[in-house]
Image (tube, grey):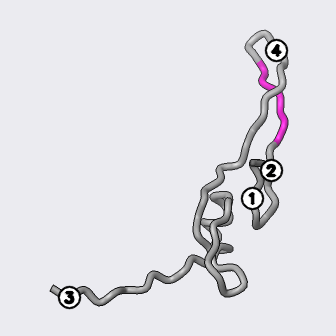
C-alpha cells in the first residue's frame, strides 16, 4: 500500500540525514496519513488522507445518523 494522500497526492520525500561530521545518508520522509471515512460522490468510503487535508477542511465527513433509543 503506497503512502500517498488520495486527495492532494502528497507522497514520500527523499532527503539527506546529516551527521555531526557532515556525512550524508539518504532517509525517507512519509506524509502523516489517516484512514478516515469521507463522502465521495454522495457515498461514504474509506480514504487515506494527510493531516493537512483534514485540517483545511478538504475532507467532507459523513453525518452520523442518530438512532431512536427506547428504554
Q: Is residue 10 above or below residue 60?
A: above
The verdict on residue 19 being magenta is no
Q: Foreground residue, 57 or 60? A: 60
Q: Tell me which residue sits at (75%, 16%) in the image.
A: 19
Q: Mark 2 points at which residue?
A: 11
Q: Please say whether residue 15 is one of the residues in the magenta stretch.
A: yes
Q: Name the residue under label 1.
A: 5
Residue toward you, 62 or 20: 62
Residue reaching furthest to the top: 21
The earlier-in-sequence mark between 3 and 4 is: 4
**How far is disc 3 from disc 2 in space, using C-alphas?**
48 Å
Vertical placement of 70 versus 33: above or below?
A: below
How many neighbours does mark 4 have within 10 angstroms: few (below 14), some (14-19), or many (20 or more)?
Answer: few
> For the residue carrying disc 2, how many other residues have a C-alpha within 10 Å: few (<14), some (14-19), or many (20+)?
some
The nearer-to-camera label among 4 and 2 is 2
Q: Position of residue 14 (x, y in %)?
A: 84, 36
Residue drawn at (55%, 80%), measured in percent from left and top?
A: 62
Kindly identify which residue carries mark 3. Answer: 70
Q: Where is residue 33 in the image (x, y as percent from the top left)?
A: 65, 53
Start and end of the magenta stretch? 13-18
- Indicate the quadrant where residue 7 lies: bottom right
Which residue bears the numbered disc 4?
Answer: 22
Please tell me whether mark 2 sits on a helix, a strand or a loop.
loop
- Tell which circle, 1 or 4, labels the residue nearer the N-terminal end: 1
Residue 17 in percent (x, y) is at 78, 24
Amino acid at each position: 500500500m503506497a503512502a500517498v494522500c488520495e486527495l492532494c497526492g502528497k507522497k514520500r520525500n527523499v532527503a539527506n540525514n546529516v551527521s555531526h561530521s557532515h556525512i550524508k545518508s539518504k532517509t525517507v520522509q512519509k506524509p502523516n496519513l489517516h484512514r478516515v471515512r469521507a463522502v465521495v460522490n454522495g457515498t461514504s468510503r474509506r480514504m487515506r488522507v494527510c493531516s493537512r487535508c483534514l485540517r483545511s477542511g478538504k475532507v467532507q465527513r459523513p453525518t452520523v445518523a442518530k438512532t431512536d433509543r427506547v428504554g
